[in-house]
Structure formats: structure tokens, C-alpha cells
Amino acid sequence: MPLTSDQEGEIAALRADSRPTLRATVPALEEILHTAIPVLDHGFVRVVDYMGDDAAVVQAARVSYGRGTRKVSEDRGLINYLMRHRHTTPFEMCEIKYHVKLPIFVARQWIRHRTASVNEYSARYSILDREFYLPAPEHLAAQSSANRQGRGEVLSGAEADRVLALLRADAERCYADYLDMLNEAEGGEARDLARDGLARELARMNLTLNVYTQWYWKTDLHNLLHFLSLRADAHAQYEIRVYAEAMMETVRRWVPLVYDAFLDYRLGAANLSGKMLAVVRRMLDGEAVVQAGSGLGPREWRELMAVLGRT
Amino acid sequence: MPLTSDQEGEIAALRADSRPTLRATVPALEEILHTAIPVLDHGFVRVVDYMGDDAAVVQAARVSYGRGTRKVSEDRGLINYLMRHRHTTPFEMCEIKYHVKLPIFVARQWIRHRTASVNEYSARYSILDREFYLPAPEHLAAQSSANRQGRGEVLSGAEADRVLALLRADAERCYADYLDMLNEAEGGEARDLARDGLARELARMNLTLNVYTQWYWKTDLHNLLHFLSLRADAHAQYEIRVYAEAMMETVRRWVPLVYDAFLDYRLGAANLSGKMLAVVRRMLDGEAVVQAGSGLGPREWRELMAVLGRT
Amino acid sequence: MPLTSDQEGEIAALRADSRPTLRATVPALEEILHTAIPVLDHGFVRVVDYMGDDAAVVQAARVSYGRGTRKVSEDRGLINYLMRHRHTTPFEMCEIKYHVKLPIFVARQWIRHRTASVNEYSARYSILDREFYLPAPEHLAAQSSANRQGRGEVLSGAEADRVLALLRADAERCYADYLDMLNEAEGGEARDLARDGLARELARMNLTLNVYTQWYWKTDLHNLLHFLSLRADAHAQYEIRVYAEAMMETVRRWVPLVYDAFLDYRLGAANLSGKMLAVVRRMLDGEAVVQAGSGLGPREWRELMAVLGRT
Amino acid sequence: MPLTSDQEGEIAALRADSRPTLRATVPALEEILHTAIPVLDHGFVRVVDYMGDDAAVVQAARVSYGRGTRKVSEDRGLINYLMRHRHTTPFEMCEIKYHVKLPIFVARQWIRHRTASVNEYSARYSILDREFYLPAPEHLAAQSSANRQGRGEVLSGAEADRVLALLRADAERCYADYLDMLNEAEGGEARDLARDGLARELARMNLTLNVYTQWYWKTDLHNLLHFLSLRADAHAQYEIRVYAEAMMETVRRWVPLVYDAFLDYRLGAANLSGKMLAVVRRMLDGEAVVQAGSGLGPREWRELMAVLGRT
């Protein structure tokens, strides 16, 4: 259970406190506002605030393109057009804020997206909780032999048990030693009065990278979609992809027209190079193109065939 | 009157449409939400959406600094501390969106603040309205002789009349020729069927820099305060300062604790260099320091004396 | 002739001053360093500094992907891979600085790219030169009737002459009145001692949007390529596209491997949506797909057919 | 010794390869270019490229402020003015690229500075080296009892030995188990052929936060100075401050005029709030102001007295 009872109480209080506003509101998102969506063994994602809706994207596009767009009466068509032609600024008009609990090694990947605002729980000031990520057996993957960055088969049997036992034992020992070096009991008083505790900002270095941290993460819709296009992708590491997938569901509730356009023009789309397009044109003209003579390298050829559903 | 009747109708409709939300709301800002605050002769600023409040800043600071800050029971004290020590990320947790109508030469200054999202009315797609800024007589300032970037005395009498007449005549003639080259009547049909109109994207180059444009401008509270610290400053050009001043009032309604901290620690504050501090220390020790021997150049000395209220 | 004799002398001095460095250098770019490439009637682009080369991109990719990439012996293949899979951070490792002279209405489009550093000539502090853009006759396009943002046929004969005369007369008159209101002669003294000059920060509002300004513009290679992908595109306005084209040539000299990859995977590429890919697969299976029943709207269908070279 | 012999060979080769350039060069920085400055027990900082110099800052300021600044003949005075009045864009015209080796917990603080480009060694693709930070005995500080984020006295004797032994043993065991789970020998082949290795992207979660990583980090001079003003400050954690101090020395060599201005107007400066300034004015008028009645809280009062050198 990823939430403390304090946090659960806080969420219940927030959800009981409805107020009137003249701002754009999205009932489907309000339904899950503040609520934690569980991710991994101890993590979660929850929407804590938002600004704007599908109509805010349309409104911004219409001020940019002015009177002329009055005729584009259909919002869906306009949003599709914006997505297809990468007119990105109207999507910046919506903003969302998440509260996320996640393992540190996932946070290290995530933070590389710089166009967001972050306030992270600081282990310099506070003591981290005793929670660390251990993969479920079905995600305990071997190194891929074909692909340096990929996963191969799932480990099984005694080997899986052995790996899990190592991960658990190391995380537990490091955390116990962390507490021991801190020499702090819950209330802040020393556990052992005979000695000083190590500074928190130093003791944290003893933790393993699967310990959970948490943060508020706020970004606009354009940058959120960019994040999701990379992290909800099949090539993303499983442990960050599950966060992206949970966030996809929040986007679907928040801006359904943008969500549909995103599925079609980004997640389901492919970028074909000039050389790839030349191959497609030759194939459409009835030519039996093979890799040799295609102008593409073997790897690009395989990528193109995969996109075209030919194997 | 800066608003069209279309815009007035739209604002009235928005203000009549109250909805329940579980998000943070700020009644004092809701009171003026969507309403246009007039600025200059044809411009305005209006808040069209916002996210967060004083408590959102506090909440973000507390997640960063963790359990330890539970004891800091007073929100005002925490916000003052954050502002004083330039802990900026908690202020990024609030977001605001303005609709602004402003002369192009003001827009050119404003846009230099890059950490904001902008959707501007496009003269490439649409025809700009016949509205241009003419300074009120009391703002028709002469060039300062002492200060290249400053204004001197106000022009008066025949000279003022002459300058205003030139500004008006040139803006009107350029706008009339713009319409003439476009050869478009209100509905989009040609005014003169015997000839083609010049492309909008070209015709716009004939407009003067005092013509009004408009945009949606969205930024977070931290970057807004940075903008205001530069543009609400006495050294800012009058024509952008009046926009900043109108926005100051929206900040006061939105996040009153942050506003107070901003007044004390930014707008009313001064940055004293190491050398300036050395001078202040000597003065406090009773020494009659003068510029020669102070370690400061004549200009720095004047700046310090102004800050200290000695002349 | 876009350069003043002062500027020409400065460039000659810079080009005569060769110094040893241990940094990456690119002889093909050094050949044109500091030199102005003419653009439009009075504008130019010139490279004034740069950091990094093709090898710097490769080096950054290899630190990211570590020992594993030692086997990727071929730099070109690695750069193509990075470009194809949108691994953008290695391209951020190169930086370039341009000095650009351009009409204000072009500068207004350009500045919307926020991920760059800019120092623009300030008309608040200084007096702008008497130079404004007038389109060459072959670029004096009519408004497209099919496409709000596009150009139609070129104006010709008496109509072209009339438009050019208006543009010229308005720019000249506005500039003359600007000088008159400033009341400043070359050396800074008043032209007419009997009156004050209007403040520079106010007088500038009388200028037309085709007056030239200039700036230093510095960005990294990733953001430069993004700029070029939008502004060297056929849909970009001609007056900014010619700047992008001049910069393309500087990129070709600077980072030839990146340039080739950019041509193939960006400028010559197309993004096909999920629905578009489904159509292509059906066509490759021999089906005679038409728009009705394709799942695509008429506009998307035309876009797809254009990409596939079918009309 | 923080560098591998491979890296040392590479640096020697780079330092032997001098080439002519027409760009701004800085001999004092060239002297140490590519060379590693040791930091902590296994880390380093080294400058691998740079763009611009003091004169590039001046040049950018002069294009902004135009002809008018011709009279400001002295570069130092202009740079001081820019720094004092926070005219930041001219400082963005210089760029620098570092190669840094640093513990992961330091990297986590550092990366919060978003306005930089980063390429980090990826433990998803590669195996991290067996190197982790252990504080020197004189930096093994106890938690401050007065200040949550600060350090108190240094631990000593048996307690220090015990803490160091724990840190070392945990890091070593976690690293050994990391290698064991990976099941990879140096060349990439399996150590134990009877079993699969865990995927690298998973195994890395077993490492402790004091393990070293490395990255290329590139930023402009303005953002570098902002980073240094926070991280070279006495309140910064020691383990990041030593990196900032090593970088300070590179700035001193690179842009000596900017460096001096930075020392006086930033590092040695203090921001006094409006209320603090009021207190200073009263003191200068001879009043014996005490905290009660000063308008300042006890904490602010102490901060002001510290700045004024009164205790």
C-alpha cells in the first residue's frame, strides 16, 4: 500500500472540499483528482492540479490564426491539424501537476526532461522511508544478448530467487545502516545517546538506487506529450513506462480530443526518411525492392519493414 | 474602449458559468477573472486562468524540506524565507494565463522573457485592427540628456502637438495603405475586383510599431515575479511598466502572502556588492566615508547613497 | 551593400588574426568565419563563433552509451542512428553564434524560438539606420485565395509598381518623421536647437515593420536544426526562409555528417500517422484504396498522396 | 587516481594537437584545456571546450546598447555595470563544456540546474566502474542540531571508524552483488555460463548513491555563474561545493573581468530587503536599533547583523 494514512486522510479531505470556479473544469478528471494511481510495488501517480482543457488548446490556436479560423467549426479537426503539423504552442496553454512516488533510478531518467518544474523530497533535510523497489518475478528480465539496452527472457526458478534475495538483502542492509548512522529515532531524538548521528546529507549516500523518493512534477501539455511519447514507448524501460501509462489515462480523461490525436499522430505514427519514402514509392509502383539496392542499411531496412508490417 | 462587443459578450458568458472543482481556488482572483483591466489607450490585461495559490507554494516547499518543516507552522514565515533565500522552485508550482492587448513595440520587449508560453494573433493569417498607441500628453517625454535610456522633461505646447500629429498621421496613413494593398473588405471579398490583394504576410510590413497586437501569455509564478521585478521597476519604459502594474494587482489578489514577500524582498530590496557592504560597515563604525577612498566608482557611489537615503 | 565600412574593416581584422587552439576546429567553417552572407536587400547572416564539430556529437553519444558503442566504429552510422531515433542531447554539445541583420517583421517570427540567446540592437538606446526591406518584384506575391497563410501569383505591371511605391513612400516618410521627432544629428547634437527631441524609446514606435534590426543569435546544434526544419521548409514565409537557407550552408560546412543526416531524416522525411500507415499497408497488399473508406479526411488524404508521389 | 590510462592517453593526444583558428581564444584557459582537476577521492572536472571571452560579453552589450556605448571605453567598467544591474543576456554569449566525474548523490543535486546540456554515462547500456565516494575523516560531519540542513562537529575516533567501515562495506557488497547479478566479465562474455545475467537496466538499482558517474555538462556563462553562486556558497553541501570551487578557477582563467565582477557583485554581495534597508538607514542616523522594534524577525535580524559584521 503506497500511501501513508496521513496521506490518505489528506486526500479524503481534499476530495470533500468542492468549490465554485469560473475557470475551465473537466469533470472526468475531477473524478480522480488527488486520488493515487498505484504504480510498481510502492509507487503512485496522482493529479493534484490542472489548468485548461481541449477548448483552451482550440482557443489559443484561434487567437494565433485569427478570424480566419472561425470557419473551422470543428474542434477535433483543428486539434488533429495542430498535432499533425506540429503546431506546438497551443498545447502549451494547458498545465498539469502530478505528485509521484518513484524509485530513485527511475527519477534519474525522468529528471532529464528539463521543461518541467520539480519539487522533490529532500534527503538532505529529511529521512527517507524504508521502501525500495523489488521487481515482480515476471519483470525480472535477463540482459538481452541482441540489444545492449534491452531485456531478454525472464529469469526463472532458483536464479530468479537468488537475484531477488540479493536485491532485497542489499537494500535492507543499506537502509538499516543508514538509520544506524543517522542515529535518529522517529521523533528526532537520538537512538543512542552516547554518540552523534552522521549528517543526513552524508548518510543518504548509503542508500541503494531502488529506494523510493517522491516529488511534485508540473509541466504543460506539450511537454507532457513529449515525455509520454518517449516514456510510453515500447523501447522505454518497463519501470518508467508504467508511470507513463498511468499518466496516459489521466490525459485521456483530461483532454480527450488531444489524447486521440496523440495516439494517431504520435504514438501510432512513424517518421519515414527521404530514402525510406523512396523505397515505399518503388514498392507501390510494383517493384520487388530488397535491402540490397534499397539505399537503406540492414538496420534501417528492418525498421522500415516493421513499420510497413512486412517481415 | 479596448474590447469589442464580441469580446464583452464572451467575457459575460464566462463570468456567468460557475462550476464546482476540487482544485485550489482563490475567491479574490475569481472576482476579476476574465475581466479586462484597461492599460494605455487601447490595451488591456485580463487573467483567463490560474493554477495554485499561496498554499501550493507552501506545500511544495514542505515536500522538498520534508517532515522537518512540519514545525514551521506559519505559512507567511515560510514564504518570506523562500523569497529571501531565493528558493525558487516552490514558486514554479503556481501558473497563470493572461490575455493581453499591447502595442507591437511593447510586445517586442516583453517577448524577450523566454520562460513563458505565448500564442500571438498572427498578421500572417489575419488582418490587424485599426488601433495604434498614441501617448497621452503627460507621457510625451523628451530624450533625457543625462541618460541615454531615459526620458527627460515632457514636451509641451506646439512641439507636443506637432509630435502627436506626426505619430497619428503616419500610423493612419500606413494603416490605410495596408488595407489598400490587402484589397480586402470586412467579409473577405475584394474591395476592388479589378486587382489582386498583396499577401497578408507581406502587407503587414507596412504597419508602424505602435499598432496593437494581442496574445495569450502563460507563465509560472516564479517567472512572473522575475518579469515584474524588471518591468514594474522605475527604470522600465513607461509603456510596459503600466502593464506590469496592472499585473501586480492580479498577483496581490491571487497570492497575497507571496505578494507581500515580493514587495519587501525584491521590489523594495537592493543588492549591495562586497565593496558597498564594506562602505556601510565603515559608516556604521562612525567613519565619514566619501567617494574618494571608498573603493567605489562615482556611479556606484551615487547608487549606494541613493539606496541608503543619503544625498 | 549590407555592411558598413566600419563593419567591413572589423571583419577583415578578425580574419587576419589567426591563433592556435587545442579545441576542435573546422577548417571549412573557418574559411567563411566572420564573413557576411547577403540575404534580402540589406540583410546578412554571418557566423561569428562556434564550438564543436561532428566528432563532438559522436563523443557525447559514446559517453552516454558507454563502452558498448566502441564497436560502432563508423561515425556516420552513429550520427544517422541518433538523428533517426531522435536522441537529441548529443546534438546539444555543439554551439554556434550568428550575427544577423533582418527586417523587424522577420525578427518577430524568429524570436519565437525561445531556446537561443539573443542580444538585439536596441532602439531604446540607439538610433536605427535608414534601411528597410522592399520585396524584389518576383517576390511581390498576391494573397493566396486557397490558403490563408500562403502566397498566390506574383503581382505584376502597374499593380506591382503601385504597391512597391506605397511600401517605399510609407517607410521613407515614417523614417524621416522618426528622425525629425528625435531631433538628433549624427554626432548626437540637436538638429534644431529651438526644441527638444522626443525620447528614443518613444520615437521608435513610428517606424514600419520592414525596417532592419540586427542581433547576435546563439544556439546549440539541436535547436538550430529544429529552427531550420521549420524555417527552411517550403511552408515558411519566403523572407525568413532565405535566412534559413543561408544558415543551411553554414551547417553543411560545420558538421557535414550531421547535415547529411538532417537532410535525409528531417527535411526529406515525413511523419505518417497510424491511420496513414494502415492505408500504405493496404496499398502494398494490392488494394486500390480511395479516400472514402481510407479512414482519412480529404485534407489528410491529399497530404498522404503528396508524400507518396501519387496524385 | 581518478583517470584511467586510456583517458590520460586521450588527454595527452588532445593537448598535443594545436590548430589555427580565427575565433576568440584565451591562452590562460588553453593552458589547462582537457586537463583533469581532481575533486573528492575519485572525481574530477575538466574543461573540454569553450566559446567566447571577456570581449564577447562586451561586444554583445555594445550591440544591444548600440552607438551610445562607444563612449564606455573601458571593458571592465562595462562588465561591472552589466553584473551590477543584472543585464544577463551578454553573459549568455559565452559557452563552456566540462567533463565531470562525480558521485551519483552529487549528480542528483547538480542536475536540478535545468539550463544546461548533459550527456551522462548510462548504466542502462554500460557497466559502471567500481568506484564510490568515501568522505575523508575531516569531512565526516555529524548532523547539526541547530540546523536541519547543516553539518555539526566532525565525528571522531571509534565512531568515525565505524561509520566509514559501514559506508565502505555496504558500497563494496552492493557493487560485488551488482557484478554477480550482471554475470558479465570484462570482455562481455558471461562469468558463469550456466546462468543468464540480470538486465543492466535492472542491476544498476542495487548500487549505492555514492558510486561515481560521469557526464559532459555544457552551459553558458550566465547560467554557469548562477550555478556557482548557489554551489560555491558556504551553505552548499561540501561535496558539491568542491566541484564549484574547481570550476571557479576555470572561470578566473577564462573570463578574468567577469570573474572579478562576479566576486564583488554576487559572491561577496548581499540582498537587503526593504525592511532591512530601513534598519540600516536608522542605524546610520545614529539610532541604536535592536531587534524588537526593527520590523525584522529574529532570524532576519541575525542575518542582517551578520551581513553588517555586527554580532
Image (spheres, coloured by chain):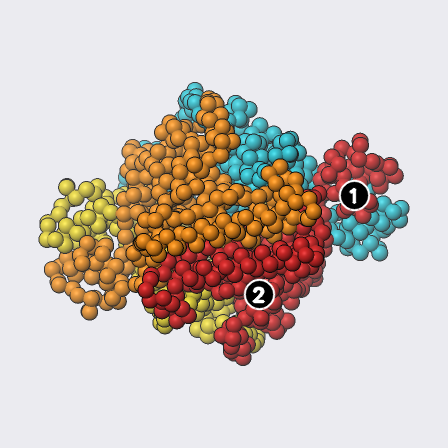
Chain colours: A yellow, B red, C orange, D cyan
Quadrant in which residue B260 is drawn: bottom right
Q: Residue at x 65, y 48 (%)?
A: C197
The residue wearing badge 1 is B305
Q: Residues within 10 Å of mark 1 (few under 14, many from 20)?
A: some
Which chain letter goes with mark 2? Answer: B
Q: Nearer the viewer, residue D15 or B161?
A: B161
Instruction: Indicate the amino acid at tag 2.
Output: His
Residue sticking out furthest to the bottom: B16
Closer to the chain start, of discs 2 and 1, is: 2
Which residue corresponds to mark 2? B42
Q: In the image shown, does A60 or A15 lie closer to the viewer?
A: A60
**Is residue B250 something that shows in the picture?**
yes
Q: Is residue B248 left or right of residue B129?
A: right
Nearer to the camera, B205 or C125: B205
Does residue A250 appear left or right of residue D141 in this picture?
A: left
Q: Is residue A57 left or right of residue B311?
A: left
Question: Can you give x and y, in whole percent of width and height, for residue D199 in the image?
Answer: 35, 46
Using a 10 Å C-alpha cutoff, classify the residue at mark 2 as few (fewer than 14 neighbours), some (14 to 19) or many (20 or more): some
Q: Is residue D231 visible?
A: no
